[in-house]
Image (cartoon, coloured by chain):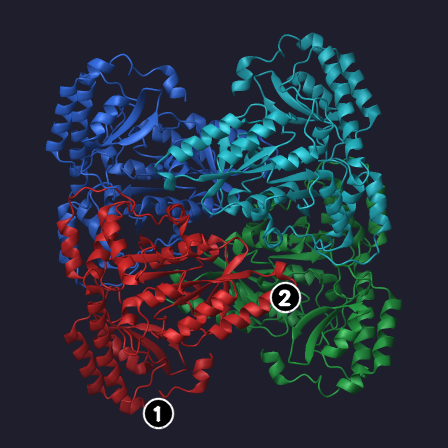
Chain colours: A blue, B red, C green, D cyan
Amino acid sequence: MAKNVIEFSSDYNEGAHPRLMQRLVETNMLQTYGYGLDPYCDEAADIIRNLCGNKDLDVHMIVGGTLTNLTVIAASLRPHQGVISPTNGHIHVQETGSIEATGHKILTIPSVDGKITAAQIDEYCKDYWNNEGLVHVVQPKLVYITQPTEFGTLYKKAELQAIHDACKRNDLYLYVDGARLGYGMVAEGNDVDLPFLTECCDVFYIGGGKQGALFGEAVVIKNKAIAEDFRPILKQRGGLLSKGRLLGIQFSELLKDGLYFEIARHANEMAELIRSELKNLGYEFFVENTTNLLFPIFDDRTYEKLSEKYSFTYYKKLDNARSVIRIATSWGTQKHNVLELVNDLKAEQFAQYNKDRCKLKAEDLAA
Amino acid sequence: MAKNVIEFSSDYNEGAHPRLMQRLVETNMLQTYGYGLDPYCDEAADIIRNLCGNKDLDVHMIVGGTLTNLTVIAASLRPHQGVISPTNGHIHVQETGSIEATGHKILTIPSVDGKITAAQIDEYCKDYWNNEGLVHVVQPKLVYITQPTEFGTLYKKAELQAIHDACKRNDLYLYVDGARLGYGMVAEGNDVDLPFLTECCDVFYIGGGKQGALFGEAVVIKNKAIAEDFRPILKQRGGLLSKGRLLGIQFSELLKDGLYFEIARHANEMAELIRSELKNLGYEFFVENTTNLLFPIFDDRTYEKLSEKYSFTYYKKLDNARSVIRIATSWGTQKHNVLELVNDLKAEQFAQYNKDRCKLKAEDLAA
Amino acid sequence: MAKNVIEFSSDYNEGAHPRLMQRLVETNMLQTYGYGLDPYCDEAADIIRNLCGNKDLDVHMIVGGTLTNLTVIAASLRPHQGVISPTNGHIHVQETGSIEATGHKILTIPSVDGKITAAQIDEYCKDYWNNEGLVHVVQPKLVYITQPTEFGTLYKKAELQAIHDACKRNDLYLYVDGARLGYGMVAEGNDVDLPFLTECCDVFYIGGGKQGALFGEAVVIKNKAIAEDFRPILKQRGGLLSKGRLLGIQFSELLKDGLYFEIARHANEMAELIRSELKNLGYEFFVENTTNLLFPIFDDRTYEKLSEKYSFTYYKKLDNARSVIRIATSWGTQKHNVLELVNDLKAEQFAQYNKDRCKLKAEDLAA
Amino acid sequence: MAKNVIEFSSDYNEGAHPRLMQRLVETNMLQTYGYGLDPYCDEAADIIRNLCGNKDLDVHMIVGGTLTNLTVIAASLRPHQGVISPTNGHIHVQETGSIEATGHKILTIPSVDGKITAAQIDEYCKDYWNNEGLVHVVQPKLVYITQPTEFGTLYKKAELQAIHDACKRNDLYLYVDGARLGYGMVAEGNDVDLPFLTECCDVFYIGGGKQGALFGEAVVIKNKAIAEDFRPILKQRGGLLSKGRLLGIQFSELLKDGLYFEIARHANEMAELIRSELKNLGYEFFVENTTNLLFPIFDDRTYEKLSEKYSFTYYKKLDNARSVIRIATSWGTQKHNVLELVNDLKAEQFAQYNKDRCKLKAEDLAA
């Protein structure tokens, strides 16, 4: 299963940033109460409230994104309500029906690059509210988006503001899944910061597990209707970690002096090294972005060859000879591995060979 | 919230045994695939299969007992089936309706000391199978017990065997929650070992989070009907840890050379120091046991006094002046703290004062 | 399955009161819109609001008690909340886990005769609200009781008032299942009427299916928090009848001029004929009541003999020779059948034979 | 709400066929046991087994299609499994998330006219079974289709056979929702009969509520894995009617001598009168079919005018001036009403006016 390869398959192939490990070791034998009621969790929550510029936020730290998503959504909805998601949203395609298992329908809005628009939300809700037979249709109540998206793309301030406004108009909550939020916040071209995100959202989370922590997502809840019962619902879903301090310690260390953003910047720089080389060599990308996930189009023969030495994620087949591949860098990606990949790409001169056949065509996006 | 006290409130007040921390640090930057598909998880599973004396077991490691219980139970039952539990079973009284949130009813059997009997199971099922109106009643399909129980008591081999037989007779699965299994296995008077437990159960788990690990419960599934879909159901419930190796590394270290049992023995010895002193001083216990949880009866005034320096868990009120208190030791309990407690108990001579009023009466058990 | 016997097994052995059948036939070919949005449903709702003395009630008519109970409860609770029920409550023992299938736990309060008290509710909630670890325990939010109870017993005004007050004190909704409400309202000794019930409850239902209708329960919702989303949740659970008018027509006919109460009176009179004869003959009753369900204690040999000609419901075994039997009368019970039963009871002089052995003992109630 | 109009809005605007009403009246005071355990239900089940040409079928009769669908699907799936449905399937768009409320995801396959193909099923499942990360994706296990579809279109024998084969290849159950099965079976061009349907399906239902009964859907289960626990699961969902005989009586009457098909033929003939006139007048249809639901494209001004006198169902907007309208006939549609509509259509000569603008264009289907 675990091959002896250089990993670019995801941003959770390593453990945690060494500073976090050190802090966990230092605090290891100190005694604290459990379930998030300890000084480290308090400290982390305070740091997060400060970074978000809002003293009145509920903060809960949870092990794992799926558990986080299903708990937030279950805590937000009445039985007949559903959550709007892009068709390629993580909750819709990668979590084995976890949301439906809480009893709620996912209401999809078409998306190619992971993003949806305020206009699409308005359109969806118009259909709902115009429909006399409301009773027969799931009521949209929450919008789920990711920042950055599964494709590494980013919402700009203006787009998020418009989505926020559409949510208000349509009586919807807005929830932003920030599994890779750090990589997005330091990406070239990004203009969304934590205070702005806090303004826009009812609830969002700051991902830790893919950005330097062993695990952990910090849910930030601004809306009191969602915050009110969050802890018992989290417990019910199995998400209240007995040694909650493990989460508090890691988030404190990541966020107290900017480590979180510093290591995210490293990941993006590593991605940019690969991206610019691929472009030099003439490769095209399924989606353009500036974060730590790349989606180049590879000839299948090339992909196989590279796979002997490197591990990527196979995203999808485009046709009989070409596929979309996902290359991920992370806080833990080592530069010498990146340079090795870059050299191998050059040496093989895949690009020359593939130039024409790997061009992205309009119909590739339609599939 | 976190007071500067000596903790005896639970067995999850510290981090992990230093050997586990060291191993986590050593392996920190090695790259592995996620979701439990890494060599450390494979190694841990092999060690567990060896210890259980059965090569054909499915092993899954999960963060947290509630998540473990709800996933095992959801994976075992059809919609109209329920799980039999003692009235004081953890799933019934301490997990915020997590089982019901998966759609299943808990069918309770009365218990005072945490245990139930084969005869009770037979009786319960006779009522069900004799009832013409089967259709109107939840079908019992799974028996949930804990070893040791929430009260630190233990099933003997003969009792477990009888329960196993009752389950077979009544077409029931048997599931043993081993959140504190290690403390039980090394306890004085215990005669149940892992191979015997494996023989008796369809599924059980070896608790790590209370016994030397940062977190982690290792679910051991013998019954193929439960094993078959376990991974996707685990993912659906949010229990598939992305960096699954953290679980594999810890369980390997705990179990490869007996560390798990060695540190459990320490906890039990620490408990015995307190237990024997309390008995010397004339205290009575709500429940007698030989493991790491003590349930002495304290005068309320005494409890308050001790609470200035020590943290216990308040279990329940007996009457206007007396309460049952839970004192927990663990792998991490330091002997000097235990001796300090013992001395304080002596010095105060609570026993003298309380001797009579703290006698346990028959009616105390009925409540 | 269907034996050629005289039925006293339940109050749903016949179809509907002939006046309802006639009205259904008369209106059969008239065209209306579906889903409860028709003039008959409007009319029935108005009649009910009038009878309850409150113009501001939501009324929904549903086919079947289980569907009614599960929808009301699902519409009332947040995910971490549960419903308090007597241990012998219908939702707890006779509906195959229907409430748990909506994700909610039933929190039981001991009951022998089907009733619970305000003091028990206070006690239960004190335990909850006093418990620091609220997060680990299901929050009680709704009290479910039946009027009359499964045992045909009745809450008096003062008792209901006290329960209402306890609910207010403990931030609980009160829900009264009135599957046999009519039989209760006209019973000797009853002092609860519809306006009083409306005052006390957040939501209750007026049972039709056991009291003269083919089917149908009329849910009356006073609390706006429960009413708000009731229709879409009802639809989601499959309870929105397409030809909703069938419910409206029947409830209008039953309630517009007192037919509902008149035929309930008949059922109670038929029950009283049997009850007084049984008492004459020395039989004892498991529970005393004045409504249409009788719970005499029969010698098993006697029960078998009678069963050749009559159908009763076997309630439970008391010991090796005696059982509790349920005898039900209804709006449709024919007097000549009752007199035949009375004569057979006399002729057999069971009482003489059984007098001593059928005495109810204290321990019979404890089981 | 209920306007004084001629109803063509649906096929449940009337009560039941007079023969059914008469039978209900005749049997009204006979006593039977409840919950489907009565001779009428046995008789109906036998008739159905005969018509289907298979003695080994489980038959359950249920009030309402939503309840039927959610129970069948809940009884068929394990927690991590989902149901494949056309994008316009009733369970996906018209039942308020009832399937998701049982915990299961609906997996959609694109459809314009209500139908899907075997090739689409193969394609969907290939994606699933080819995906290494099975664990992160809902497993398709059941295919849900309707015959006739929501658009009144029909699967031919060859198509159903191909779908059956695709299901076998991909380890899927096949479930056919026959809410309007009778209208389909007697439609021009149909070649699917009950024995063939039985051969193809694991489970299907024969709709009664839209085809001459007051209510009622007869679920026919061939697959023992689904049949095994169906009754307790049906009870749990609130679908076990206490006076089950009401269902048995109606289905017996409908099916014992072909009444069901005879009255369906009437509905189709009434539809054909309208259809052919609309075609004469130059109207186009959103979907072509031969059953009782018509989907003409109307100019909005025309639709408004007709709506003063007739009630249709507004299906959807095509552009600023045109809409798709649904006209339904039923067993109860009176010929003079149909002729009146036909005359009004002529008189208005809408067609002349709309001829060009109401042409269906390619892009209308894409929306």
> Which residue is rendered at x = 19% and y = 69% of the image?
B262
Q: Position of residue C343 (x, y in %)?
A: 87, 76
Same chain? Circles 2 and 1: yes
Residue drawn at x 38%, y 53% is A234
The amino acid type, in three-letter code, at marker 1 is Asp
> The residue marked by circle 1 belongs to what chain?
B
Residue C10, label in figure: none
| Image height of D110 relative to C257, above or below | above
Q: Nearer the viewer, residue A247 or D202?
A: D202
Quarter of the figure with residue C143: bottom right
Q: Residue furthest left?
A: A336
Q: Is residue B110 above or below residue A141?
A: below
- Percent position of residue D52, x then y: 70, 39
Residue at mark 1: B356
Identify the amino acid type marked 2.
Asn
Residue A320 found in image quarter: top left
**Residue C252: where, in percent of width, then height?**
78, 49
Q: Is residue C246 left or right of residue D93?
A: right
